Amino acid sequence: MKVGLTGGIGSGKSTVAEMFARRGAVVIDADAIARELVEPGEPALHELVDEFGESIIAADGSLKRSELARIAFHDPSATERLNAIMHPLIRAETQRRLAKAADAEVILYDMPLLFETHQEDLVDVVVVVDVPEAQQVKRAVRRGLDEADVRRRMEVQTSRSRRVTEADFVIDNSGSRRNTERQVQGIWDELRAGVC
């Protein structure tokens, strides 16, 4: 069973992914894949420099993520250019990892932009982690992101209402950790019942 996990910035996807992993899911993390693809020497990093300039490279040759985000999320055309470089590479690596984990009972694909990149076809069911937008902003800012940057990112993400409508399961992550754990367990039980 391949499960797509998604949600807006600051919704708590990583926490929920960790809960599924503790129950035995094999987790494929799109953000981790993206970080690997832009390590020094990787072709994607060279493409990003060609597109967005040397200012996105730190003195040690690594990607300055905050600078890339500042440039790429400043306007829709820059975001599109970033996505055109990264998303096909992320999708290809995801497909490779899904194939490698094919024998697992539950594979969880943690992909923040699942709908935006039209990758729903890679999974059997979609789980959306949902919180009110004000809470998204508050959590993301608490993680150290700039509020204006958070709001720009939210503008280019699929709307909260569409995510919830398109989901097979919705986890309300606005309350306590215990409440979220209960919801994860309920979904886990349903997933395992569907594959056993």
Image (tube, rainbow, N blue to C red):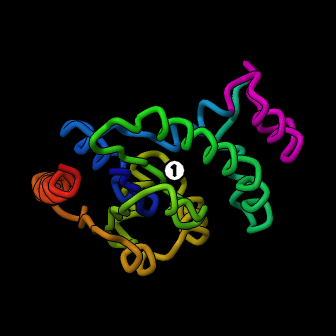
Q: Residue at x 44, y 56 (%)?
A: 123
* Crowdedness near tag 1: few (<14), some (14–19) or many (≥20) residues, C-alpha within 10 Å: some
| Range of magenta residues | 38-61
* Any part of residue 19 in sight: yes
Q: Residue at x 82, y 38 (%)?
A: 55
Q: Indicate yes or no whether the magenta region holds residue 103.
A: no
Of residue 135 and residue 7, the one placed in the foreground of this image is 7
Of residue 172 and residue 111, the one placed in the foreground of this image is 111
Left or right, 99 with reference to 186: right
Amino acid beneath label 1: Leu
Q: Looking at the picture, how far across and down is residue 101, in whole percent?
A: 41, 34
Q: Indicate yes or no whether the magenta region holds residue 49.
A: yes
Left or right, 43 with reference to 153: right
* Any part of residue 176 in sight: no
Q: Residue at x 13, y 54 (%)?
A: 189
Q: Residue at x 36, y 62 (%)?
A: 125
Q: Looking at the picture, how far across and down is residue 37, in whole percent?
A: 66, 33
Tell me where residue 96 sits by quadrant.
top right
Of residue 148 and residue 29, the one placed in the foreground of this image is 29
Q: Name the residue beneath numbered marker 1.
A: 145
Q: Looking at the picture, how far across and down is residue 165, in whole percent?
A: 38, 80
Tell me where residue 56 sits by quadrant.
top right
SS state under label 1: loop
